[in-house]
Each structure stands twice: as C-alpha cells, then as structure tokens.
Amino acid sequence: MDYDLLKSQILKVNKAFYDRVYKDAWLSLVFKDVGQDHIVMQQTDFMVTAFGGPKIYSGRSPFNAHPHIFVNEEMWQQREKFLKEAFVETGLAEDLREKWLKIDEAFKNAILKNSFSDCKKRFTMDEIVYHPHHPALKKAA
C-alpha cells in the first residue's frame, strides 16, 4: 500500500470531519482546549498507524486520552454520522471506509461512558469535559 497516498486521503477525511465536529455544540467541547489543526494531524497519524502504516502516532491510546471526557452512545452516533459524511465528501474508497469504521469500533468501549461518574481526571488540574446542557446528562448523572 502507498502510505503517502493513504495519509493524504486520511488527512482530507479528518479535515472534513473536524470541520463538522468543531461546529457541533456537543462534540466541540471535547476539543475546546485543542487546536483543530493539531487534532487533525494527530488523528491522521493515528489512523495511518492503525491502517498498518509506519508508526508515526506518538499520542496517548484512546483509553488513556479520554477518561476525563463524557461521551455517551448518542454522542458517538453523532460523531459517526459526521465521519460518514466526511467519507462521502472526500470520496474515500468503500474498502477504506469499512476498515476505518472497524478501527473506530475497536476503540469505542475505551471512549464511551455509561454515566458522568465514569469520568476520571488524568491529571489533578484536569476538568471533566462534558456539555452541561446535554439532555443525556439528565439520564446519565
């Protein structure tokens, strides 16, 4: 596989995806302290590595990166909707779409929380990240 070509395709998808995420009232809060260009490049490196390319990702694993973030199934579905829209917008090949979604599914349980109380700070100064008016918090709290 040509990993330079793959990286350029993944980069296009991530740009289109994060354009949607950063405009979304719920999901944008997950990245409120992270520059969009930074997360696009970081996630591009992550996905290239996950697709079997060279190990260029140097960030935390999804489990270690997200313990302080409240993401429930409803938010996950919104995220997946944005991702699928980005696939279509960028014309990503169907086989790559399927593989990407399988990779996502493998990390889903490391990111989702059943309730707000499942969130844990990574560092003393961390804040628990959530949308304070998200309707699911009434159910999850």
Image: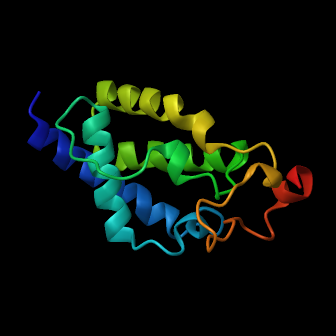
Q: Can the viewer see residue 92?
A: no
Write the residue at 60% across / 69% down. Answer: 29
Tell me where residue 77 sits by quadrant.
top right
The quadrant of the picture occupied by the C terminus is bottom right
Instruction: Provide residue 132's location: percent of width, then percent of height.
Output: 78, 70
Q: Is residue 108 above or below residue 35?
A: above
Foreground pick, 106 / 79? 106
On the picture, is 16 further left or further right than 74?
Answer: left
On the picture, is 83 further left or further right than 126?
Answer: left
Instruction: Provide residue 35's location: percent of width, then percent of height.
Output: 40, 74
**Which residue, as the protein is rendered here, is positioned at the far front?**
124
Foreground pick, 94 / 124? 124
Write the residue at 37% across / 62% down. Answer: 39
On the picture, is 134 further left or further right than 98?
Answer: right
Q: In this view, does 128 lie above or below 103?
A: below
Foreground pick, 14 / 109? 109
Instruction: Provide residue 56's location: percent of width, then percent of height.
Output: 21, 46
Tell me where residue 137 sits by quadrant.
bottom right
Q: In this view, does 67 lie above or below 107?
A: below
Q: How many labels does the image show?
A: 0
Q: Can the viewer see residue 118?
A: yes
The quadrant of the picture occupied by the N terminus is top left
Q: How is the image coloured?
A: rainbow
Q: In this view, does 107 lie above or below 71?
A: above
Write the residue at 81% across / 70% down. Answer: 133
Instruction: Provide residue 95's location: percent of width, then percent of height.
Output: 31, 24
Foreground pick, 88 / 13? 13
